Amino acid sequence: MSDSLKLPKKIMLLGSGELGKEFVIAAQRLGNYIIAVDRYENAPAMQVADCSEVISMLSADDLERVVTKHQPDFIIPEIEAIRTEKLLEFEQRGITVIPTAMATNYTMNRDRIRELAHQQLGIRTANYAYATSLDEFIQVSQTIGFPNVVKPVMSSSGKGQSVVNSCEEVEQAWNYAIAGSRGDTQKIIVEEFINFELEITLLTIKQWNAPTIFCPAIGHRQERGDYQESWQPTAISEQQVKEAEAIAQKVTDALGGAGIFGVEFFVTKDEVIFSELSPRPHDTGMVTLISQNLNEFELHLRAILGLPIPKIEQLGASASAVILAQDNSDSIFFAGVAEALSEPDVDLRLFGKPDSRPFRRMGVALAKGNNVQEAREKANRAVSQIKILSE
Ligand SMILES: Nc1ncnc2c1ncn2[C@@H]1O[C@H](COP(=O)(O)OP(=O)(O)OP(=O)(O)O)[C@@H](O)[C@H]1O
Ligand SMILES: NCC(=O)N[C@@H]1O[C@H](COP(=O)([O-])[O-])[C@@H](O)[C@H]1O
Ligand SMILES: [Mg+2]
């Protein structure tokens, strides 16, 4: 692709959150033209894009309207909740969908990607079953056992997810999952609880005309199914890295196309277990904004445009920690920014989301240290200085 590459390209971003914002910045640094799309006005990526559109990305008609209007060269999904059948149609019309329309279709629902990984590719995952009613959930809980982890098949960032310890908790977990489910499906996945030692994201870069390459694994910690901290490098063995890379290669080859994938694994004493993947930059990968010569957004862009990635360099012990809102508000401001930035090798991203709700991610602190523990402490110290206030 790079032989005939002419810039700028017209890029339509479907989803305009914090990950999209950093991607737009990377794309614009190479002069590209970006149309940022999301369901609400003034979303983070819209603030730095050339133009924006507010639509329902689950509506085929809305997607048709904005694609016809802008005629993009590339459509780059940034979230899962998109009418992906429509993306297949755009792809057939000659627009490049990243990584492929099929990949976005497989990963928007947990059941599709799980079936691909486990049934078709034979990759080890947590034992799992599905349920579409409370009764069915009670039944499959007997097979999977307790504790188990319950998630709506359509959700992300831990929405509707809970750990179920006994029969008594099943009904509450069902109601919570259905309330947190995106779209109109009443389907949940019930998974064996994996008692892992560490979770990692393996950022996997699939290129059009060059071999797949990997970033050094990123370790992370989650609460309520949502990312709290991430760091790089991680203390896993060469053998574990090789196992994770082989699995990531297998799944991303099956999905095809080009771009970065965030491939998630549970690492136990004896196993590396595939969890799920995002065919786009990953929230835990925000640590690469400080930890690598090329961050995950720049890598995504280069892979999409077919530009070379001559080297990925890890710059030493680094960490990220999230800044979460506590309250509902549409007039928030940040205090303590100067204090947070007073330590060397600490940086911040405040996303500029126009409103807050409890646990909404509003920013991230980034830090480097002499070792991972020090980097994590510095990132968390910066977070503790930031106060989100309302007018
Ligand atoms: N089977 C499991 N056993 C133990 N912990 C689990 C299991 N499934 C999920 N978790 C925990 O919940 C977190 C979120 O799960 P998962 O990645 O499936 O959800 P998600 O909503 O897709 O999150 P995101 O969109 O942020 O990637 C995991 O990173 C892990 O910490
Ligand atoms: N785990 C997926 C993830 O982190 N996605 C990121 O969060 C945004 C939605 O945030 P919001 O819910 O605060 O609008 C998305 O647009 C994306 O940038
Ligand atoms: Mg996940």
Image (cartoon, rainbow, N blue to C red):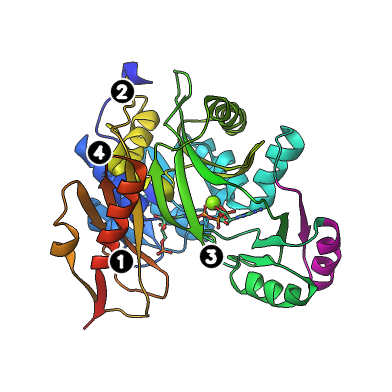
Residue 242 sits above or below residue 22 on the image: above
- Badges 3 and 2: C-beta atoms under 8 Å apart? no
Q: Is residue 36 visible?
A: no
Q: Where residue 41 appears, x then y in whole percent?
A: 32, 67
SS of the residue at dot 4?
loop
Disc 3: which residue: 224
Comes first in the chain, label 2 or label 4: 2
Question: What is the span of residues highlighted in magenta in the rendered image?
Answer: 126-143
Q: CA distance from mark 4 to mark 3?
A: 37 Å
Residue 191 sits above or below residue 339 on the image: above
Disc 2: which residue: 5
Front: mark 2 or 1: 1
* Foreground residue among 93 and 190: 190
* Foreground residue among 179 and 14: 179
SS of the residue at dot 2?
loop
* Residue 287 counted in the magenta span: no
On-image quarter of the C terminus: bottom left
Front: mark 3 or 2: 3
Residue at the outermost bottom position = 391
| Residue 360 occupies quadrant | bottom left
- Amino acid found under the numbered disc labelled 4: Asn
Q: CA distance from mark 4 to mark 1?
A: 24 Å
- Residue drawn at point x = 84 percent, y = 71 percent: 135
- Residue drawn at point x = 27 percent, y = 43 percent: 369
Give the crowd class for mark 2: few <14, some 14-19, many >=20 residues within 10 Å: few
Disc 4: which residue: 32
- Amino acid found under the numbered disc labelled 2: Leu
Q: CA distance from mark 2 to mark 1?
A: 34 Å
- Badges 4 and 3: C-beta atoms under 8 Å apart? no
- Residue 177 located left or right of residue 201: right
